[in-house]
Image: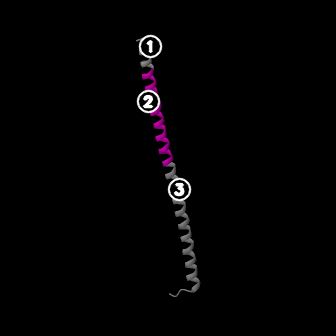
Amino acid sequence: MRQTLADWEQAFSDEITLDRRRRASLQRTAAQRTLKREAHRRQQRSFARFVLLVLTLILTALVVTAVMFRTLYLLLG
C-alpha cells in the first residue's frame, strides 16, 4: 500500500482544515464563556448594590423615626 505524494498532501490539507475549524470553535467557546462569566459578575455586583441600597434606606428610615420621636419627646416633655 503505497501512498502517493498527492495523497499525503491531501491528507495534510484535510488535517490543517480540521485543525483550523477546531481552533475557531475553541475560540468561539472561550469567548462565549468569557461573556457569560462577565454577565454573571455584573449581575452579582448589581444585586450587591441593590441590597446595600435597601439596607441604607431602612437604616435612614430608622434613624429619622428615632430622631423624630426624640424631638417630639423634647418638645412635648
Residue at horizontal 55 percent and vertical 78 percent from the top: 12
Give the spatial CA distance, label 3 vs label 1.
64 Å
The x and y percentages for residue 30 are: 51, 60
In the image, 50 versus 17, the foreground residue is 50
Amino acid of disc 3 = Gln
Give the spatial CA distance, label 1 vs label 2.
24 Å
Q: Earlier in the sequence, mark 3 or mark 1?
A: 3
Which residue does the numbered mark 1 point to in the structure image?
A: 75
Residue at horizontal 47 percent and vertical 30 percent from the top: 57
Mark 3 or mark 2, which is nearer to you? 2
Magenta segment boundaries in residue numbering = 41-67
Which residue does the numbered mark 3 point to in the structure image?
A: 32
Which residue does the numbered mark 2 point to in the structure image?
A: 59
- For residue 13, above or below residue 61: below
SS under mark 3: helix
In the image, 25 versus 61, the foreground residue is 61
Q: Is residue 25 left or right of residue 75?
A: right
SS under mark 1: helix
